[in-house]
Image (spheres, rainbow, N blue to C red):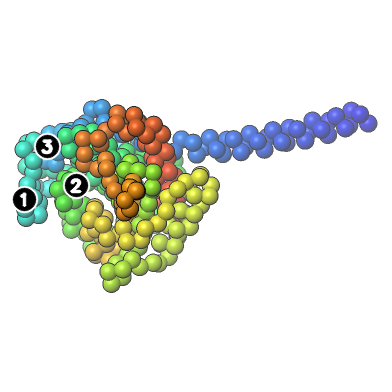
Amino acid sequence: MKKHVFLTCLCLVAVALLFLTACNNDDNDHSHHGRLAVEHLTHINDNLHGRFAFSDREHETAMWIVSQLIAMGHSADNIEMQSFHRDRLPDGHVAVDAAQRDYSQNIILTVPGQSGRIIVVGASYDGLRYGGVSSNAAGTALLLESAQNILEQEHHYTIMYVFFGAGMLSHTGAAYFHETLPWHLRENIMLMINADALLEGTHLVYGAGYNQGDIPGANAVTTRIDIAAVYVRETYDATINPIRNMIFSNNAHLPFTSDGHTVMFLTSFYLPETGGFASPIHRSRYDNLEHLNANWPDKVQNNMRQFAVFLEQVLLSAE
């Protein structure tokens, strides 16, 4: 009898240990989010600062992005280098003195899905003379991590990762990509996601919607995005919240908003005591990892983790 009780207790303990191990493994399965992005971010901060539009360093960054995509296992056949001339710059915009090239470039990675419907995920990769980590190495790093993880994930939609050149100059690369996209592809876009200024503060936000008479409209896609945000907040202790009118921000997603597409803008803010929103790091001499890590030791890792988890949930959500 005692032996039977002992074996029963032993079995219960074993089941409990298996349960706890499964829970811990589940946590560990998601603890990697943002790690690859931070590694890419660190490389850009240390080696690719001064990524002025139309400069040799911007072109060097573009080639590095392509090399990373191929090293992950993406086929070169699915990667396009889309060049555009500096005469595409809007009136009043000129390349800075550091620019040495007549052309900038977008890098387009197409990852086929089960459906021909398309999600465009974009971020500008050029920057200023500083590290340019919030603007916008962080967005670039987020896309690189997502592009690597998607190789091991089943996804319904075709995903186009687009690294935009000349983003600092009125988002010229994003406008050129949208303008030259063939109609049969443009009509199949069900969502455009843009990531920029991800390290400005601890207030992480997204704007999702479409242009419904100059107000943010909602549809089935934005509903799925909101459900994903709730799931991420409840499951991963995330703090990402919606601000609908962000879809009208002057950023890389704006050509898609203006064309009637559903968009989602990922960004972050600092909330000063005087009220309103502020972006103290964006395009400043403080836009480097050394300053960010010295003043907010956990912000880079935390922000990148939350955005990585959220982006993954949106990309993998079923139709």
Q: Taking 303 as reference, is 224 above or below it?
A: below
Residue 62 visible in this rendered orientation of the protein: no
Rounded to the nearest angstrom, the CA distance separating label 2 from label 3 is 13 Å
Q: Secondary structure at mark 2?
A: loop
Label at residue 87: 1
Q: Taking 67 as reference, is 224 above or below it?
A: below
Between 212 and 153, the one lying in front of the other is: 212
Q: Amino acid at mark 1?
A: Asp
Q: Secondary structure at mark 1?
A: helix
Label at residue 56: none
Left or right relative to 315: residue 71: left
- Depth check, mark 2 against mark 1: the one in front is 2
Identify the residue at the far front of this view. Answer: 274
Q: Give the mark nearest the N terminus, 1 or 3.
A: 3
Residue 254 placement: quadrant:
bottom left
The residue pinned by badge 2 equals 167
Q: Amino acid at mark 3?
A: Ser
Q: Amino acid at mark 2?
A: Gly
Q: Residue at x 27, y 33 (%)?
A: 288
Q: How far from the left and from the top, in percent, is residue 152?
A: 44, 41
User: Does the CB distance between marks 2 and 1 fall below 8 Å?
Assistant: no
Q: Residue at x 27, y 40 (%)?
A: 281
Q: Give the mark nearest the N terminus, 2 or 3.
A: 3
Residue 310 visible in this rendered orientation of the protein: yes
Between 75 and 278, the one lying in front of the other is: 278
Label at residue 55: 3
